[in-house]
Image: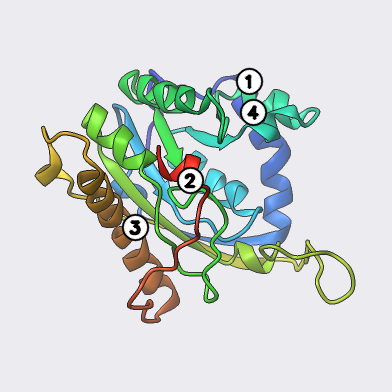
Amino acid sequence: MPGNPRSPYGFWYRLAAAIVKPVLALFVKHHWRGHEHIPAEGGFITVVNHISYFDPLTYGHFQYDSGRPPRLLAKASLFTIPFVGMMLRRTGQIPVHRGTADAALALRAAVDAVNNGDCVAVYPEGTVTRDPRMWPMTGRSGAARIALTTGAPVIPVAQWGAHRIAPPYARGGRGDRRLRPVLRQPVHVVAGPPVDLSRYAGKPFTSDVLKDATEDIMAAITALLADIRDEQPPAERHTVRRPARERAR
């Protein structure tokens, strides 16, 4: 798939790929599906399940191979890490300042990026899943807000396998290592057709509209993951209680 001329792979993106892809080739045996659902041009949003601190690399590899570079919404603290922060800024990733007065800046930046023809990638759960069986949890409303504001397509993406390389919430130490460098670990990343949010078009951004649109997004991701895992997802979605200041947003 050709790259979007409005979002080319510049020097810094190619440098990041040159550093990361050889490492991933050692640890990951990738199984990519669904690149045909990635728009060849114009802005769009990808919504991705989060199973490991390693999976931004595997998802990023998948998205890079599609020909459309992603701009991830990433925790602002990552931008303070030497070299990592520089690469995040140089490749156009978007910092998210959670629980601060600057939290809305990420949403505005994401809307501007989509309107400028970019791919903006969102982890709608907001954190690595806490579901005991690692199914997608209840989502936050950011992806729905971006989609309903811009009218851009929302492409669901499910991934599975990265958690075996870097287990979520591992504490380190014997028997609970944060990194398990097994060579050629199978990792599946699958994109599906756009989520149909047309029934919300033109409606005010009420809590019910955002909740329902977000659940439609999470349901699409979950269906893709169920196909990858060949398992039935739980009837009820796991929910993490959030501080009152976050629930109010």
Which of the two discs, 2 and 4, sits closer to the camera? 2
Q: Residue at x 20, y 45 (%)?
A: 209
Question: Going by the picture, which residue comes out furthest to the right?
Answer: 174
Residue denoted by label 4: 88
Residue 243: give x, y in percent of width and height.
53, 48
Label 4 or label 3, whichever comes before in sequence order? 4
Residue 120 screen position, x and y as percent: 42, 33
Amino acid identity at mark 1: Arg
> Please, is residue 228 above or below residue 108 in the view?
below
Contact (Cβ within 8 Å) of mark 1 with mark 4: yes
Residue at x 28% of width, y 36% of height:
147
Q: Which of marks 3 and 1 is nearer the N terminus?
A: 1
Say whether marks 4 and 3 touch (CB < 8 Å).
no
Which residue is rendered at x = 48% and y = 45% of the image?
244
The vertical placement of 198 against 241, above or below, is above
Q: Nearer the viewer, residue 208 or 106?
A: 208
Quadrant for residue 141, please give it.
Answer: top left
Residue highlighted by disc 2:
244
Residue beneath label 1, please?
Answer: 90
